[in-house]
Image (tube, rainbow, N blue to C red):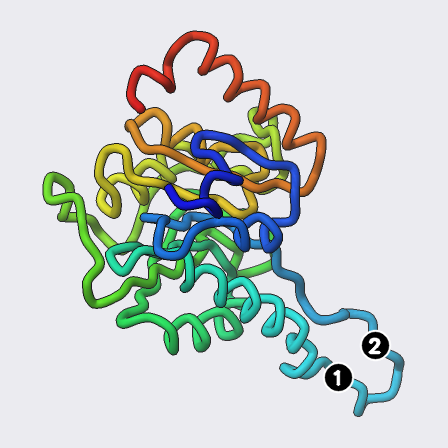
Amino acid sequence: MGDCMEKIELNRIYNMDCLEGMRQIEDKSIDLILTDPPFFLPAQHYQSRQDWQKRYSDLSVLKIFWGTLLEQYVRILKPTGHLVFFCNSDSYPVFYEPTYNNFHKCKCLVWDKGQVGLGHIFRNQHELIIWARHADSLFNDDHHLHSDILKFSATPPNDRDHPVQKPETLLTELITPLTVESGVVLDPFAGSGTTLMAAHKINRQFIGFELDEGYFRDTEKRIAGLKEQGKISEWF
C-alpha cells in the first residue's frame, strides 16, 4: 500500500464525508464500488401559476454532485474494477449519461422486490441498478451466469437499521461475480453497513464511509465485534 492508502485502512468504516475519504485512497486500488447514493427529486411545491412547472434542469445540483463523486470513483477503481449503484427512474437519466461517458460499458439491472409498494395504479415493485465497467474488468470465473433481473425480497421495515437498507442476499449476489477473494469493496454511503457485512462474509475486504454518526457507531461496533472474534484477521 502507498502512503495515501495507509491513511484509510482496510476493513474499517469511517465517520466522514466520502469525498474527503476517497481523496485519501490510492489511485487504482479498489475492485468494486457498490453503493446506494443519496438522490433527491426537484421541489414539488410550485405556485398556482400554470407556467411554473417542474423542469428537468431542477436536477442540475444532483448532476454536479454525481460528477464530483464519479471523478473519484474513476480515479480509485482498478482498470479491472466495477461500479454498481442503486437509483430510481427519476435519478437514472442524471446518473447514467456521465457514467456511460467514463466507462467502457454500462448496463441497467433491475431489482425485483416481489411485491408492490405504495402508490396509486402502477405501484413500485422494483429499483434500478447501474453497473459500469472498463474494457479490462475482471470477473469471478466461478460465478459468471446471472440474470439482469435480481429477485430478492426487500428487507422488512421492522428488521431495518436504516430506512433504505438493502437485503444482504442481494448485495452478495452483486459482489460475488464482480470480485475475487480478498478483493476490496468500497461503499461510500455505507448506512447501516450491510454492504460491508456482505463483503466480509464472502471473504472480501472492505472500506466504508458514513457521515451520520449514529449509523457509523452501530456499524463500527459490528466490525469491532468481528475483529474481537478473529473473523476478519483470519482471512487477511
Q: Nearer the viewer, residue 192 or 117?
A: 192
Q: Using the image, determine if residue 65 lies above or below residue 86.
A: below
Amino acid on which the number 2 mark rests in the picture: Tyr
217 vs 2, nearest the viewer: 2
Q: What residue is drawn where x is 15% and y is 41%?
A: 143
Answer left or right for 59 relative to 93: right
Q: Which mark is residue 53?
A: 1
Residue identifier under label 2: 46
Q: Quadrant of the N terminus?
A: top left
Residue 127 appears at what percent x and percent y?
46, 54
The x and y percentages for residue 159 are 56, 25
Please identify the residue farthest to the right as the structure is shown: 48
Residue 197 bears which disc, if any? none
- Label 2–label 1 contact, CB within 8 A: yes
Asked which secondary structure carries label 1, the reply is: loop
**How packed is label 1: few (under 14 Cα within 10 Å), some, or many (20 or more)?**
few
